[in-house]
Amino acid sequence: MIWTALTALLSHWRSNRLQFFAMVAGLALATALWSGVQAINAEARASYDAAAATLGEGQFDQLLPRSGDRIDQSTYIALRRAGWQVSPVLEGRLSTEDGRVRLVGLDPLTAPGTIAPVGMQEAANLDDFLTRGVLFAAPDVAEALAAAVPQRVITDTSVAPGVALTDIGVAQTLLDAEAKFSRLIIAPAQPMGLSDLAEVAPNLVRQPAQDAGAGRLTDSFHLNLTAFGLLSFAVGIFIVHGTISLAFEQRRSMVRTIRALGVPLKVLIGLMISELILFALVAGGIGVALGYVIAAVLLPNVAATLQGLYGASVAGTLQLRPEWWLSGLAIAVLGTGFAASGALWKIAQMPLLASARPRAWAVASGETARRLGVVAALLFATGIALAIWGQGLTLAFALLACLLIGAALILPLLLRSAVTLADRKVRSAMWQWFWADTRQQVPGMSLALMALLLATAANVGVSTMVSSFRVTFVDFLDQRLAPELFVRIENPDQSADIEVILLSEAREVLPLLSVETDISAVPTELFGVRVGPTYRENWLFLDDDGGVWDRVEAGRAVVVSEQLARRAGLWIGDPVTIAPALILPIAAIVADYGNPLGQAIISEPLFRDLYPDTVPTSFGIRTDDPSALRLALTEKHGLPESGITDQSRIKAFSLGVFERTFTVTGALNVLTLAVAAFAILMSLLTLASIRVPQLAPAWALGLTRRRLGQLELLRAVVLAMVTTVLAIPLGLMLAWVLLSYVNVEAFGWKLPLYLFPGHYALLTLFALLAAALAALWPALRLARTPPSALLKVFANDR
Amino acid sequence: MVLTVQNVTKSFPGAEGDVPVLRGVSLSLDRGETLALTGESGSGKSTLLHLIGGLDRVDSGSITVGGREITTMNDADRAALRRSDVGVIFQQFNLIPSLTVEANIAFQARLAGAFDADHAVRLSKALGLSEHLTKYPEALSGGQQQRVAIARTLTARPKLVLADEPTGNLDEATASEVLGQMLRLVRETGAALLMVTHSSSVARRMERHVHLSQGHVV
């Protein structure tokens, strides 16, 4: 019985292959975008975990130099003698043929137990590690290193990407940093009664564990990606929902017959669920494979983004990790269950003797549309409440969800209203029929149009955000990169001499002095600037209370970055502790994009008083003739060409990083829109099968088949146009939420909203073109419907 | 007796309370017997047929099919009864459009686990369907589709065949031909036949005739 009934159920798909294709393709696309994003996230998290496991990032508190980037061995010895259980780490870059490798030297005798590559723990040849100077690295790095260092390089897949590990002594030799360390890891267990750090090592600053981990820093970025994946998944599920609903409506008579012939309802429902699970697994499998391809294509850009925004290293190659492909299959099954639950419920509730004629399968007939409108109004109200009183990234996404779901739910009502309005304006019988018929089609196309609405709104919203960001970022680069040339020196001892040379040749010299410190418990880069025309003329503030540079120059105020201000809950006028004996009020807030640390700016003299040992190793140079100055510096004063960079190169590089940062969102944007176009195509094709009875009377009354086909095309374009026009204000609201809430929570900065009417017009054109292309085939099929098929509608045996 | 109906009542909810459709109907049918159930529209003919087929539940009374009381059966048992002991032929044919004629004919017998390929071939030949076995129902005329429905029912060798206006959708000549074939084959299989019909000419071709009026046998 089971097999016979299942064969009958499955036979529906054999004779409705397009419907089957729509369902599988919709589900596969939805799963692909979701699992692609999950694959990227899983790869990144695996990289962070590897970094945490092998380098101690984020696991332990650390001691960092207050200025400069090295700690003297004497400081380490002083701490050990004072009882501090600390372990030294030395980091630096090694050049190889393929690029630069991050070399990390550890002291296995003092390092906390969980730090070390797995292979090293298991093979446990400590003697090798300590005496023969082996290096451990991931396979790609190991290959590149083998030719670059004399030591033996052991391949270990558990080592973080782009990193090589070795004994600290070997690292000191390879990095030419004898008796120097980069940081000291503080063991979790420390003896009682330790001396205060300020007494033993006043030149070190303690960084709490949670601030150091890449995982925490990048959580918001991954949440953004996940939200995008979920949006794409939702758009795909609309296709699946539409197809399954239609298929189940068409199978009502079959279900009734099978039940009448003796198959119990429970068995039938069980078979339908099994059938759907089977399809979900097949489509999910295809989706996971597609997701792998998407992730493999996008991962290098994501890795560049994470490196650029957060300084987090992520492997550029993808592994088939169970957590994402299993989650892909699981969400395919869950999504199918969600899409089919309504249809299954209706079948389960259908009395055996109920009419088998297919009812309207759409979500929104008049009454339903009004009910959905009420739900949408409630969601909008919730969104407004969240916008006013909510805080945090999750609530920002909840606000987005309220906005998008509410807009999707209210769409059928708005479309019906628009069509009714058009209906009232026309006089001719044909156009009256056209609008009446269009109103009848709105429910059937609602899901596809909702998908188009969401995809277009997401496109408008995200592109507005990215373009607004680009405009702001270019302005920001113009401010920050005002100096025409930048000079970097390798040896800090030459700093003073070089500065004298630069002063003799340039219009203005801006030494770049900075140390890393904590301000209001936020990791911050403190700058000492030489206040002059460049700062006064070029820097724009997000907020200030007047006379900023005069007060900074006089050592009476500080300028802080927006990220520091928002994270520390500070704003203009608030006092800030710069050093134990120095508290200054905030005179201005400046924007700072692309830097995970906070920034604080004080005057150069004040900085030199606080950190007398810190000397500038980079200088910004103002000049009217950069080429002549570059020539003079290299020819006359013998500065190396590689140490001089001009402004345009840095700008181009920064913009390049920016563009790569948003490649992934751009790609997801395009994919989502493509899925929405596919949803329209599938909707129209599946609707076409039940359109004949609706069109036959119009044909019988004198409309040609060709004319009917043209009107079908026009109908799809009109509905798509109304939807796209509605999507633009929705997209702008989305952009506003992204810029005003999500970005502030995720990155710590708030950006101004710019409008790009040209882009919206182009997008509308694309959406209409996509709708027209999607409608073309179904319209042609209808136009070519043989008269015999139209006549069947009037036959007695229907 | 293959079928015994005793004092069956059935009502349906209406705008002004329950509307009684059957008011104590009793009848019986022996093996190999044919019975026409006639009556005006709304007299309860189809309702009685559905109750006998276990497609609906009685309000009161008793129905036994092959000696088994079906009014106390649960859904699964009634479904099992329909698979093996009862065959229903509908006015609208109710074929499965996505299965071929051959698969449709075999369908109920396969559900019951009693498919006999030779028997199916014989029935197909007898009903003139041999040339259409690989076609889908939509390619057949109404008369041919009803023949497929008859073959589907008889292939499962039910003890009781219930037919609800099986020729109601066919023209007069085709209806007469289909009815003749059905009666002949039902007699050959030894099943009892209860047929709901409006047509007095159809009713005359049956061995017995029961008329329903306002929910009563008259």
Image (cartoon, coloured by chain):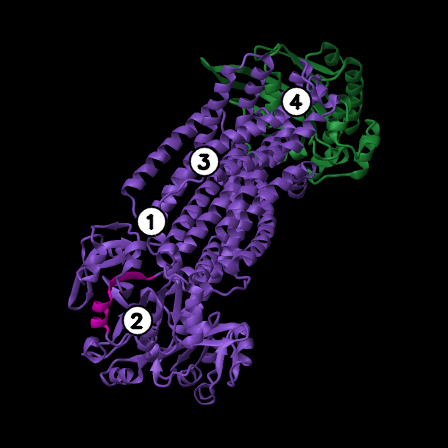
Question: Is A677 on the left-hand or right-hand side of A627?
Answer: right
Location of residue A498 (image quadrant): bottom left
Residue identifier under label 1: A750
Which of labels 4 and 1 is toward the front?
Answer: 1
Q: CA distance from mark 2 to mark 4?
A: 73 Å
Q: Residue at x 47, y 58 (%)?
A: A652
Q: Looking at the image, which residue sits at the far left?
A: A581
Name which of mark 2 and mark 3 comes first in the sequence: 2
Q: Which residues are magenta?
A: A597-611
Residue type at mark 2?
Asp
Residue type at mark 1?
Lys
The correct choice, above or below, for A180 with respect to A597 in the image is below
Closer to the camera, A169 or B73?
A: A169
- Report if residue A606 lies within the magenta region: yes
* Quarter of the image where the N terminus of chain A is located: top right
Colour of the chain lettered A: purple
Q: Position of residue A547 (x, y in %)?
A: 20, 53
Q: CA distance from mark 2 to mark 3?
A: 48 Å
Residue type at mark 4?
Leu
Name which of mark 4 and mark 1 comes first in the sequence: 4
Residue identifier under label 4: A708
Q: Residue at x 75, y 32 (%)?
A: B136
Residue identifier under label 2: A61
At numbered mark 1, what does the secondary structure look like: helix, strand or loop? loop
At numbered mark 4, what does the secondary structure look like: helix, strand or loop? helix
Q: CA distance from mark 3 to mark 1?
A: 22 Å
Location of residue A399 (image quadrant): top left
Question: Callout 2 environment at 10 Å: few (<14), some (14 to 19), or many (20+)?
Answer: many
Residue type at mark 3?
Ile
